[in-house]
Amino acid sequence: MLDYAHLAEKKAHNSVSGGGYEIYNTDQWEKGKMVADICGHFSTAVKNNEIQVWYQPQVNYKTGKIVGAEALCRWKHEKLGWISPGIFIPMLEQAGLIYDLDCLIWDKVCQDLHRWNEKGIQHSISINLSRYDIEKNNNIADYFNNLVRKYDIAPSQLRIEITESAYVEDTELLLKTTTDLQKYGFIVEMDDFGSGYSSLNMLKEVPVDGIKLDYIFLKDEKNKEKSKIIINYIIKMLLQLKFNFIAEGVETKEQAQFLLNIDCERMQGYYFYKPMPVTDFELLDFDDINNKTANRA
Ligand code: C2E
Ligand code: CA
Ligand code: CA
């Protein structure tokens, strides 16, 4: 009972209003157990190779070619089976473990890029950089620079995605990190643009190389026509401002065609490919997105 009371007390402490009260409920207990299963098992999971990098190809729908891929982490937990990043990433962030996970992912991506370069295949891969990573290591640009030197890959092969909310929450540090990364030749993209926090002013202030449009614009069935108008004008604006951009979360042919009609050529989403293990990714035909199983090896 004391354990339950402590959990409720913790929740009351963390609540935004503060100073209120909370009543213990079983969901909280289950969540606490899940956090323990995930964060407590993390270092063993690393040793046991439970954590993998999967790749989701990005395409140019106009040319029909694969133009890159996003590296997304996947965890096959010893006890819980496959767990979604949507669950374990926020937990690792809270526990201060996300930097360890990300360092592992970036290392694996650079190993893959090195192997592909050796075979004469030059890919560019997008990786996710969390705000917590930058807070943990204020010199993240130096870290990445050492990493690409270690694996002898070009900095421009790494596209570093930073979510737009990070720019709002810690503007100064994020702006410095962005320019430091660019000085070394890395490509920096603002992830989840339009997901809630963005102000158009940010497009002026933040010196990113590219913008990743959040899927929220495509998913809004209720306000479909309004969403289409908004996305149309955002793309016009990005074109005039000379930003590179890509739309994510493209799930249907209709969405892909709509985006192409308004001059958005680069896309990522289940309509084209779902995230896949590296062995499957290596079998793709990069020159023809309709030919999904050609063996390039
Ligand atoms: P994100 O960076 O916005 O990544 C895109 C997410 O959308 C991925 O979810 C991807 O599988 C999913 N997705 C791709 N196409 C579609 C589509 O057509 N429809 C729908 N509904 N979803 C699509 P995933 O892999 O579950 O990752 C969720 C989030 O977890 C990522 O969102 C990212 O913020 C975070 N994440 C994933 N891997 C890493 C990592 O290695 N490090 C860090 N720091 N965060 C990561
Ligand atoms: Ca991302
Ligand atoms: Ca995103």
Image (cartoon, grey):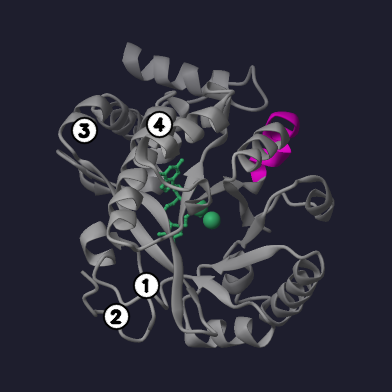
Q: Amino acid type of disc 1?
A: Tyr
Q: Is residue 243 left or right of residue 50?
A: right
Is label 2 or label 3 in front?
2
For the residues carrying marks 1 and 2, which lies nearer the camera in this image? 2
Helix, strand or loop under label 1: loop
Snapshot quadrant of residue 173: top right
Distance (Cα) linking label 3 and label 1: 27 Å
Q: Main secondary structure of the magenta part?
A: helix
Q: Residue at x 33, y 49 (%)?
A: 114
Q: CA distance from mark 4 to mark 2?
A: 34 Å
Q: At x 76% / y 69%, what residue is drawn?
A: 234
The magenta span reads 165-174
**Disc 1: which residue:** 273
Q: Nearer the viewer, residue 57 or 77?
A: 57
Label 2, on which residue?
292
Residues marked 1 and 2 touching at CB (< 8 Å): yes
Residue on which disc 3 sits: 45
| Residue at the top extreme, as displayed | 2
**Local SS, label 4:** helix
| Residue named by callout 4 | 92
Q: Residue at horizontal 46%, vertical 76%?
A: 251
